[in-house]
Image (cartoon, rainbow, N blue to C red):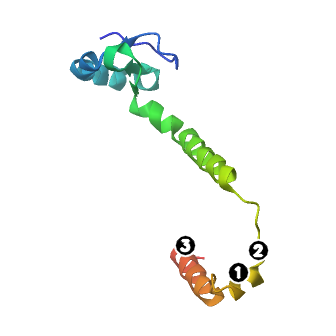
Amino acid sequence: MEHTALTLEPTKVLTTTEARTGLPKLAAAFHAEGIEGGIVFFGPHRRPDGAIVPAAMLAALAPYLEDIVIAERVRQRRATDTGERITMAELIAGGRFDADEVSAEADKFAAELGA
C-alpha cells in the first residue's frame, strides 16, 4: 500500500474501505519505517476526515499536541472571562474557600510527592 511520507497536507486520501483493508500493510510499513512512515489520510469519498500515523510519530508529537489542547482551553476561558477578580479575603468571607481544607489537601499532595 502506498503512503505519503512526512507531509501534513493530504496529497493522497484513501477511502475508509481502502484504509481499513490496507491496515496490515500500513502497520508493517510503520513498524519498519518508524517516524519516517509518514501520515496516511482517509475518509469517505476521499475527503480527509482522519489520519493514521506511526506510533513513533505520535509519541514525538505528544507534548506539542497537549500544548495545542491546553491553548484551546485557555482561548475558551478567555472568551468567557468577565474580568472580575476577588481577593483571597473576599473568597474566604464568601464561604467559597476553606483555607484549612486547602492546606490539608496541599499537605497530603506534598506527602504523596515525597516533599
Of pointers 3 and 2, the one earlier in the residue sequence: 2
Say which residue appears at 40% left-offset and 33% top-offset. 55
Which residue is nearer to you in this view: 68 or 61? 68
Say which residue appears at 40% left-offset and 20% top-offset. 41
Q: Are marks 1 and 2 in contact (CB under 8 Å)?
A: yes
Which residue is nearer to you in this view: 78 or 67? 78
Of pointers 1 and 2, the one earlier in the residue sequence: 2
Of pointers 1 and 3, the one earlier in the residue sequence: 1
Label placed on residue 113: 3
Residue identified by numbered label 1: 91
Q: Looking at numbered disc 3 in the image, what kind of residue is underneath it?
A: Leu
Q: Looking at numbered disc 1 in the image, what kind of residue is underneath it?
A: Leu
The CA span between labels 1 and 3 is: 28 Å
In this view, the mark in front (1 or 3)? 1
Say which residue appears at 70% left-offset and 57% top-offset. 81
Label placed on residue 83: none
Label placed on residue 86: 2
